Amino acid sequence: MKTTTILTAILIVFLLILTACNLTTKAVVDPNDKCSSLTDRAKDNCYVEDLKCSKVKDAQMRDSCVVGIAKIKKDIQICELIQIEKTKEFCKEQIAEITNDHTICGTLRDQYWSDNCNFQLALMNKQDSFCSLVSDVDQKNECFKTLALNTSNLDLCEFISGTGREACIYKIATTTHNVEACQFISDSFNMNGCRAKIARETGNSAICELIGNSNIKTICLEDVKAKK
């Protein structure tokens, strides 16, 4: 009997301790804060969505939250609150795009975001001089190519290195039906192909006569004739 009483008392004490632990560890729910009932990453995500950045625990998520506020307010000074340097540079680059302020590009220390800033604003403002400021060769070529095609400016193709130069000329020449531009293509096959394409699309057999390769010329004349 005594043993049973002791065991019962121990069980009651254990249950009281367990209940006390649950009460102390249970999250405090603020009725005015919909995120307070959540935990860990879910809570951080909730605060990020509501742009309550100061309540976000994870440093990376908090910085991303600050970027969102900076973009909404279009205020580059808010970017200075960001702790992670690369994210801070990204924030400033975004403000440069939103406000169309090219001077910001020159202040960026991260080469990736500096290049991206010059690239985006070059296309936004149709400023080829901004393309020249891009240090990455592939991105610089893409900048000049995109701008050349968007404006049908053959001169910009000359700034493209490698095979991209002639592909740029071919595209503009055939799109605008500028047969004279085909002569600036050094590869004879592509040059003749350029002339043949324009001849077919315009139905002008005289352009076929400019083709040096007899086989391509014959096919060109037949295609134009068949189109009529």
Image (cartoon, rainbow, N blue to C red):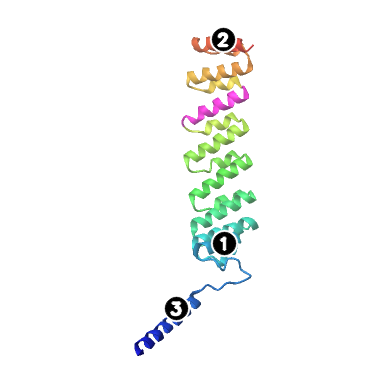
C-beta proximity under 8 Å, tags 3 and 1: no
**Residue 170 within the magenta-colored segment of the rendering:** yes
Question: Which residue is located at x 49 percent, y 48 percent?
Answer: 112
Q: Is mark 1 on a helix, strand or loop?
A: helix
Question: Which residue is located at x 35 percent, y 90 percent?
Answer: 2
Q: In which quarter of the image is residue 194?
A: top right
Answer whether residue 209 is visible to the viewer in this image. no
Mark 3 or mark 1, which has the lower sequence index? 3
Image quadrant occupied by the C terminus: top right
Mark 3 or mark 2, which has the lower sequence index? 3
Which mark is in front, 3 or 1? Answer: 3
At label 2, which amino acid type do we have? Glu
Residue occupied by mark 1: 46
Query: In the image, residue 119 lies at what x, y percent?
Result: 55, 43
Q: What stretch is highlighted in magenta?
A: 162-177
Label 3 packing within 10 angstroms: few (<14), some (14-19), many (20+) = few
Query: In the image, residue 100 lies at what x, y percent?
Result: 63, 48
Answer whether residue 192 is visible to the viewer in this image. yes
Question: Which residue is located at x 63 percent, y 50 percent?
Answer: 98
Residue occupied by mark 2: 222
At label 3, which amino acid type do we have? Leu
**Residue 76 within the magenta-colored segment of the rendering:** no
Residue 18: which disc? 3
Image quadrant occupied by the N terminus: bottom left
Q: In this view, does 36 lie above or below 111?
A: below
Label 2 packing within 10 angstroms: few (<14), some (14-19), many (20+) = some
Q: In which quarter of the image is residue 6?
A: bottom left
